[in-house]
Amino acid sequence: MKNAQCCIKCNQGKIFHAHDVLDRGEGNAGLPMAIGRSGVIHAHDFGTLEAYICMSCGYTEFYVQNPRELEDVQPDTGGIGLGEVRKGGPCA
């Protein structure tokens, strides 16, 4: 739905874009939902998510706002269930 005008599930055209998706942290503080966070004192979120929601059926798609920042992620940066960049050719 990010690049489409209609929902891929119900074909309706009213799409809500949530640029920032929030999670709740300690003390109920709103934190950006992200793939991971590096550091403790000067924490930096990487893989921050945005969402596209169909206003008719509720179908939701999440996208990483800046996918390129994941290229520099190291396994020891504290991301829970952090994956790896798979090197491959072009997809058909």
Image (cartoon, rainbow, N blue to C red):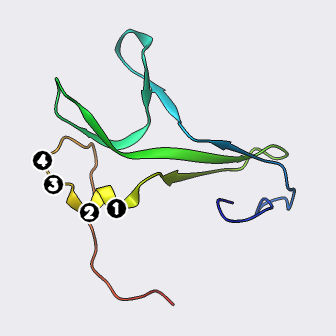
At 16% from the left and 33% from the top, the residue drawn is 39
**CB atoms at circles 1 and 2 under 8 Å apart?**
yes
| x, y percent for residue 9 | 78, 60
| x, y percent for residue 86 | 28, 74
Spatial CA distance of label 3 from label 4 is 5 Å
Spatial CA distance of label 4 from label 1 is 18 Å
At 27% from the left and 68% from the top, the residue drawn is 85
Residue toward you, 9 or 89: 89
How many dots with numbers? Answer: 4
Q: Secondary structure at mark 2?
A: helix
Q: Say which amino acid is labelled 1.
A: Arg
Q: Secondary structure at mark 3?
A: loop
Which numbered disc covers residue 74? 3
Q: Say which amino acid is labelled 2.
A: Glu
Q: Secondary structure at mark 4?
A: loop
At 78% from the left and 59% from the top, the residue drawn is 7
Q: Earlier in the sequence, mark 4 or mark 2?
A: 2
**CB atoms at circles 3 and 4 under 8 Å apart?**
yes
| x, y percent for residue 55 | 81, 43
Q: Is residue 58 above or below residue 75?
A: above
Q: Nearer the viewer, mark 3 or mark 2?
A: 2
Q: Secondary structure at mark 1?
A: helix
Q: Which residue is mark 4?
A: 76
Q: Quadrant of residue 46?
A: top left
Spatial CA distance of label 1 from label 3 is 13 Å
Which numbered disc covers residue 71? 2
Q: Which residue is mark 1?
A: 68
